[in-house]
Image (cartoon, coloured by chain):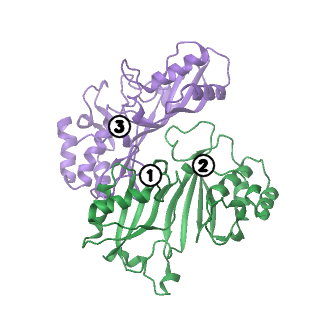
Chain colours: A green, B purple
Amino acid sequence: MPRFKLTLEYFGPAFAGWQRQAHAMGVQQVLEDAIEKFCQQQPRLHVAGRTDAGVHALGQVAHVDIAKDVEADTVRDALNFHVRPHPVVVVECARVDDDFHARFHCTARRYRYLILNRPAPPALAAHYCWHVPRALDVPAMQEAANTLRGTHDFSTFRAQGCQSNSPIKTLDELRFEVKDAMVIVHVRAPSFLYHQVRNMVGTLAQVGTRQWDLSQFQAALAAKNRAAGGPTAPPQGLYFVAAHYDKTVLETGLPDPKDDNTA
Amino acid sequence: MPRFKLTLEYFGPAFAGWQRQAHAMGVQQVLEDAIEKFCQQQPRLHVAGRTDAGVHALGQVAHVDIAKDVEADTVRDALNFHVRPHPVVVVECARVDDDFHARFHCTARRYRYLILNRPAPPALAAHYCWHVPRALDVPAMQEAANTLRGTHDFSTFRAQGCQSNSPIKTLDELRFEVKDAMVIVHVRAPSFLYHQVRNMVGTLAQVGTRQWDLSQFQAALAAKNRAAGGPTAPPQGLYFVAAHYDKTVLETGLPDPKDDNTA
């Protein structure tokens, strides 16, 4: 069966997260139902990052095998027809090799977190950011964030229920950008623990509001204990931005994502 | 009575436009009701640009006299409390001179229009842009837009019901910017005719989709007739971004008080 790579956008607050669930609507179910309507098969979607309830995606990646001889653009348009009225869309669809795997071959995941930092609440972005009225010291947050870069035991930022084998992860980027009243946090790693980004952002906000200084932040990381960390930042500020499939994987014999559009 | 300048943000689709109306909720009413709750007076708000139903604001400006001896930040916080749950907020509040006038002293108004240009509909931005699935030739749109810059009779882009004395206006900026799939139109002028921005964008889209060439666009402008123009772009893509108050212009006299500035 032809395999397709789907690049997905979805509005987090409308869903109980990515995964199919018995009593709530997951993004996976909406898409699998749409595929079933399109090609009368029971499909199985595999995804790069299983986002939690309320978390948005701008560039989530999934793959699926479709028992129908169709162009990739036709798959995109048909699924966008059948997912309605749920706020999830296939932004791009590309034919890929049969051994491409959205989850296991993903070499880096990128997230973004938006904090609206001003006294006035958001009129337009209420469902799209975390509103922090108290002025944030962004340089202090960046200084603390820099101590998280590299390889650490991230137990302090790991939520209960995390299925990862190890709390040791490598963080490649945690960068703050300020655009008017919006503080944008750029995060990139090969993989993350459960709630890791939201727990890091919530704890960094303790530094930003000067409730914690740098040494307290570093002590929290060193404690390797969730109880030592700050609160979990709310889900509506978090965006799954992109999944990368890069050369190191290619050299082991797996497909080149740049060839994906050749369908 | 102390006069305050309010910088406002509001989510257009929640309102029947700026103006107070008998059978629908205008932004003006929500704010005037909030001021009344705060200081037990019947206030009168004056605004830089009376936006139409569905149009957003990021930096609308209004002024109001408040019969209470209070700090500007207190006015901001009190109004943000009393406007709830309506999606309008006072982003900034500042004490101004008694002769400051948000409408008559405004020397330039800036709007932004967002077009999502890709086959897939928006999952996150459905209420925040105009979705145009057909590929737009943005350089061709910019070339046509350049012919609108300067002083012209803009009757082709003037909606019925416009209260401006004259269809002759000066357009200072009409610039396209492309960010991923989003086409952002930046527009600036001292004042606008009713629906002018949405009519210009809708007509430029005819050029972008290659239904019209440059000479057809120029003929439409020269016709000085709304019937010769293209369709009106939808309201949810339009944002009132900023009102400028420039001292040098103030000293030379007031702009046309009958201008709609509803763009």
Quarter-wise, where is residue A89 in the image? Answer: bottom left
Instruction: Determine the chain carrying the residue at label 3.
Output: B
- Secondary structure at numbered mark 3: strand
Residue A227 appears in view: yes
Provide the secondary structure element on which disc 1 rests: loop
Residue B32 location (% of width, % of height): 51, 20
Bin the neighbour count of mark 2 within 10 Å (Cα to Cα): few under 14, some 14-19, many 20 and up. Answer: some
Q: How far is the residue under mark 3 from the one under mark 1? A: 52 Å
Judge by depth and name the residue closer to the eye, B202 or A40. Answer: A40
Mark seen at residue B170: 3
Q: Work out which quarter of the rendered image holds the N terminus of chain A and state it.
A: bottom left
**Relative to A99, is A190 above or below?**
above
| Residue A234: assigned label | 2
Q: Position of residue A21 (x, y in %)?
A: 47, 56
* Chain of the residue on which disc 2 is drawn: A
Q: B218 or A8: nearer the eye?
A: A8
| Mark 3 nearby-residue class (10 Å; few <14, some 14–19, many ≥20) | some
Kind of residue at disc 1: Met
Which mark identifies residue A25? 1
Left or right: residue A263 compared with residue B252: left
Subunit bearing disc 1 = A
Kindly identify the residue that appears in the image at 17 percent across and 40 percent down. B228
> What is the CA distance from the residue labelled 1 to the residue labelled 2?
19 Å
Which mark is first along the chain, 2 or 1? 1
Q: Amino acid at mark 2?
A: Pro
Mark seen at residue A70: none
- Front-lying residue, A15 or B122: A15
Give the CA separation, mark 3 to mark 2.
Answer: 46 Å
Helix, strand or loop at label 2? It is loop
Residue A54 location, x and y as percent?
Answer: 52, 50
